[in-house]
Amino acid sequence: MNVFNSICLIACTIPSLLLGQEIPNDLEQEIQRRVSLDINPSVSIGILLPDNEVRFYNYGQYNAQNHQKADSLTLYEIGSITKTFTATLCDHHLSKELNTSLSALFPEIDNTHLAKIILSELRNHIAGMPRLSEQFSPKNWSDPFNGYSDSLLTIELQALKPDTSRAWHYSNFGYGVLGKAIEKTTQRAFEDLMGELIHQAEMSNTLLKHRSGTTQNLAQPTNIGTQNSYWHFSGPSRYAGGLVSCTKDLINYLKYQKNQHPLFKSASIEQLIQTGIQDLGKDQLFYKDGWFVLKPDSHNDILLHNGGTGGFTSFIAYNKNTKIGVVILSNAVSLMDDIGLKLIYSAFKLKRPERTIAYELADSIERGNVRDLVSKYEKLKNENYPDNILNIYWLERYFFGQGNYTVSNQLSDIMVKVLPDDWEVMDIKGQNLERLKRYKEAAEAYQKALLLNPENELLKKKIQYCLKMR
């Protein structure tokens, strides 16, 4: 990644925005290219300038069927940006309880491991929590957190065996536990806690959950160029990813954080936690109290977080040096983080995402051509068509969630070909075979998954069930 070589060069990034110029032409062309290819059907951008002046830019249509163009009030699922709200609730309500153990807050759960986990570790993703618990097995993978409950959280905590290394490890499960801990400490519900915060931040358009029926300005979720499902977070999972918002409100949220949060106000940030993530540059991405901290050079500290659901991505960031903030929302699973970073740190190198093989497979499926998807995948790959196995994963989970196992099973075959030694991939293959009532083959797939992850109790139960049903 390119970095600034002098303070003088850094200073050059500020006037271009302050003088009222639009988004640079090359950057706008890249945004328009992604929109035209349906990589990101709609993109909403908000920029916060040092004097609190705000600019909004919008591209594409958030509902292609109705030809509705995006604006600053278009609503998107913001996914894991919700975690920054939950971390803020910690500051508001748990400042004196951050060293409290989970065993003290969940005395009804008989698990000695909880005594060794404290709330501050949950907030910083160093509590040894898995990304998702091993007991997490949604009924509908195209809307995976719908139906999540306090009782399920209790089951997951009862079986929890945390990683004792205390290395940084991002955890959706951990933030669900953290949210429930806030509720138990304050004796207040999610609606009360989060509702109060969004009111304080003047986020009058933000939703705590999807409203019943169709909201007029709610973007249509898409995945790899196809219409996807909304995600309905319930129970404690709401603290990990449940909010629905717009660029206007999230810019107000940035203003609120600038005025209230110690990370935004302090001259320097102490005791940063190394994440080990190399995507934005080697040893440059850290974490602290709900926010990622990108240090691309010795002059810039960029506070940021992104989010993603089944049909949306989100990005929020603030450059403490230039005092410029940015919010980007899109109704697609293709990240726009590079665009956001480029806007507030001009040396950041843009990516150039292309339509991958999964887009062509999705088009074929939409036209009803669902035979031999594996051969189509291999043909496109041999033609050097861009590939991304994560796109195949998203597509498989969507059709699996919709109950179209004929399609999802073929997509799982592709995943097995690419990642034969990944236990989650073998688990997914087993799930498809089980739904197709091919129980013997399902048991074999689950057994391969168990060999790769021998302590997974849920896999053992799946094997027992399939052997019983065969």
Image (tube, rainbow, N blue to C red):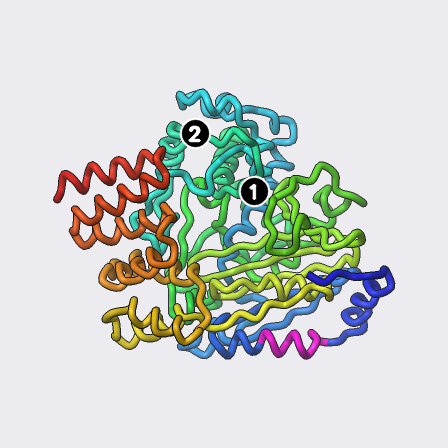
Residue at 59% in and 58% down: 315
The disc placed on residue 161 is 2
Among the 4 quarters of the image, the one containing residue 122: top right
The location of residue 292, given as percent across then percent down, is 64, 48
- Give above or below for 22 relative to 404: below
The location of residue 327, given as percent across then percent down, is 63, 61
Among the 4 quarters of the image, the one containing residue 222: bottom left
331 lies left or right of 341: left
Depth check, front residue: 121 or 470: 470
Check disc 1: other Cα within 10 Å, few if <14, some if 14-19, many if 20+.
Answer: many
Depth check, front residue: 129 or 419: 419
Residue type beneath disc 1: Thr
Residue type beneath disc 2: Lys
Disc 2 element = loop
Q: Is residue 178 magenta?
A: no
The location of residue 234, given as percent across then percent down, is 41, 45
Give the spatial CA distance, label 1 vs label 2: 24 Å
Which of disc 2 and disc 1 is earlier in sequence? 1
Check disc 2: other Cα within 10 Å, few if <14, some if 14-19, many if 20+.
Answer: some
Name the main secondary structure of what is drawn in magenta. helix
Residue marked by disc 1: 86
Disc 1 element = helix
Point out the stretch of residues depicted in magenta: 22-31
Residue at 73% in and 56% down: 319
**Going by the picture, which residue comes out furthest to the right?**
8
Q: Is residue 29 magenta?
A: yes
